[in-house]
Amino acid sequence: MSTDGRTVLIAGATSASGRAVARALLADGARVIAVGSNRGRLDELEASVPGVITELADLTVKYDVLELSMRVHARIGDVDGVVHLVGGWRGGGGIPGQTDDDFRALEASFTALRFVSRTFWDDLTASDAGRIAIVSSTTVEQPTAGSANYSAVKAASESWMRSLADGFAKAGDTGAATIFRVRSLSGLEDALADAVVGLWAADAAELNGRTTTLA
């Protein structure tokens, strides 16, 4: 299989990695819906990546995600894949430096993952090749005092993805939830893009629940 003719939604698409993933998917024949929370950055993405379809939504707000789903279904149809790139880094300061403000900012990525995966779950399980992927961190296995907030949120996101993998396994053998880990995404944008495109070339049963470290 390939992504040709499939619809893939990129959550948090205006980052460098989001642009790389969008370009790679479009080059492979996919329809790409790029979702972000900043209209200006979405306009820049649309100008630099011809063919991408942009959607404005705050993915940490449940009703924004539901409205996004309605617009996507009315405009394009069901989605075959979700690439979750909502996130960011906040850390340092040891354990006393793990502030509540930092935790709430990081936790937003997990909230967005929950809302997006639940809202588009029926699409993914109905597809003959449903795929959902996140980018996590190697600090999940080796957390540090300075990364405690960040590592805890990434660990929660990975646990959610493994629950999605169980859901796919119970729904049949066509869907897969997979995790990509990085130490840092800087310099790995193209590697991530290639890995995302490759999700549709691999067998779902082999992908489902898999964690892959990109280096």
Image (tube, helix red, strand yellow):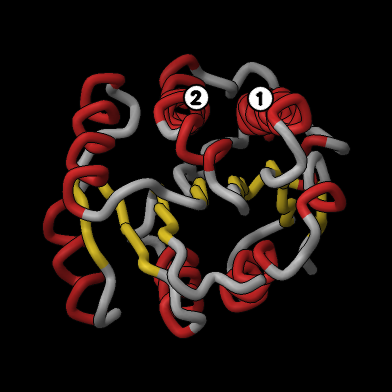
The residue that mark 1 highlights is 160
Give residue 52's position: percent from left, percent from top: 28, 71
Circle nearer the N terminus (1, 2): 2
Q: Residue at x 22, y 59 (%)?
A: 54
Residue displayed at 66% across by 59% down:
184
- Residue 156 visible in the current orientation: yes
> What secondary structure is found at the residue carrying circle 1?
helix
10 Å neighbourhood of mark 1: few (<14), some, or many (≥20)?
A: some
Q: Amino acid at mark 1?
A: Trp
Name the residue at 80% across, 39% down.
209
Residue 105 badge: none
Q: Position of residue 143 (x, y in %)?
A: 80, 33
**Looking at the figure, which quarter contains the N terminus?**
bottom right
Determine which quarter of the picture holds residue 172.
Answer: top right
Between the C-alphas of marks 1 and 2, the distance is 8 Å
Q: Which residue is mark 2?
A: 114
